[in-house]
Image (tube, coloured by chain):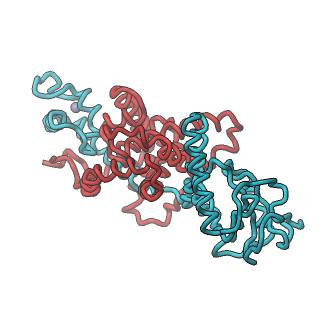
Chain colours: A red, B cyan
Amino acid sequence: MAYLSPDPSFEWRMTASAKTETEQALVRRVARGDVEAFEAIYRRYRLRVARFAARLTRHPDIVEEVVNDTMVVVWQKAGRFRGRSKLSTWILGIAYRITLKRLRESSRRTRAEVELPLEPQSSEADEPEARLSRSQSRERIRQALLRLSPKHRAVIELTFFEELSYREIAEVVGCPHNTVKTRMFHARRHLRQVLEDGASFTPSRRLSDVP
Amino acid sequence: MCPDTASPRTPSHESCLELLPWYLNQTLDASERLAVETHLEDCSACRDEVVLLETLQSSVRAVEPPPIRDRFNEVLARAASSRIRAFRASPLVRWLVVGQAAAIATLLAILLWPTATTRPGSYQTLSNAGNVEPSDAVLRVVFDERATDLDVRALLESIDAQIVAGPNTAGAYSLRIVGRPVDDRERTKLLERLRGDPLVRFAEAMRGAPSPEPED
Ligand SMILES: [Zn+2]
């Protein structure tokens, strides 16, 4: 693992795997109409689903609707959850389909009222020079990501925030493994282009310096 | 670009490059990981790509989740009523649910209103059918016969309501709102909410309570 920096989410993922059985038990209770189990799942996944949906759309109303609709579907379809995949993968898959459906519906309405303007950029002029390039490249990446399609952004988010394997991502978005890799590849190429167009991108650390 | 793409021990440069994001998030299986690590030793292009991906990773992680409101009660009410709609498709299940609701209604009648008969008559004159109602009751509601106690509980929770009396001979329950004052505007909103719910057959403001219609 010479090329990896310590992974802060490692512990979180260990906890998640220890919780797997509990989560399956929770879903079984939801399937029987147990309100407390349903509330537990709602509390555990509300912000996670919101975050994921927010990466696919900038419309705050859609985000909240996606969270609520996803949870209603979890309640309705809990009996069909077989536990072959993780609960998070199942729930994010539901959220993914609902978000894309919402986006299709809203693109049929006037685009102007659907897309919010980009949030104002942070005032980078105030920052110390050392942090400038890092924050600039982050900002440039953020802008570049916004120009990707929701399907490409989903693969990025599921990889780098949710830390799913490409096999799990394929389950969430319902496509073959190779499509996941291709979408990721396209997103990376686009990103590299944007960053190389901007003159000031300097990597925080040169990996060739690593022994 | 990549000196050892032909080596049998490592995957080609292309397939290594493709796997790097999942090398970084540590989800590759053991043989994939080993192949990538071996290739990285000799390929500076792939090492550069790791730098780019680390920047991408840190900028993805830096984004905060959007602030969204806690809507559990609303979600629960919708979830419960959607399951009722699903039941309607199946006649057998529907009869079971109706039976359950009727049993619960009877039980509630015995507990809360010993002298009442539960068979609803006309819903047009709900207030005539009742007896004494607590003074803080603001709304009168007849639930759909298919509503289970779970549905009713979820619906009431979603509007912070409690049953204070009922059912009267018309099958109506009197509700009060807990924890906040109810003015005209609020009462109108509550009525709209209840009347729009498939679990509610009838909802009205209590007689003697101020008019539910807002003045402006
Ligand atoms: Zn390479």
Extreme residue toward the bottom, this view: B135
Which of these two is toward me, A5 or B191?
B191
Of B151 and A153, which appears nearest the observer? B151
Picture quadrant of residue B34: top left
- Name the spot of residue B201 as percent of width and height, x first: 73, 51
**Quadrant of the rendered structure where residue B26 is?**
top left
| The one of B186 and B119 positioned closer to us in this rendering | B119
The answer to whether B8 appears left or right of A76 in the picture is: left
Q: Position of residue A129 (x, y in %)?
A: 40, 63
Report whether residue A48 is seen: yes
Is residue B72 positioned above or below B16 on the image? below
Residue B45 higher or lower than B80, as above or below: above
For residue A133, side relative to residue B103 (left or right): left
x 32%, y 46%: residue: A163
Q: Residue at x 47, y 45 (%)?
A: A74
Please indicate, yes or no, whether residue A136 appears anywhere in the rendered image: no
- Quick check: which quadrant has ligand 1? top left
Which percent across, then down, holds residue B96?
A: 55, 43
Across and down, in percent, residue A194 comes to 45, 39
Which residue corresponds to the image point at 82% horizontal and 72% vertical from the top-left? Answer: B209
Q: Is residue B166 left or right of residue B93?
A: right
**Relative to A78, is B14 above or below?**
above
Mark count: 0
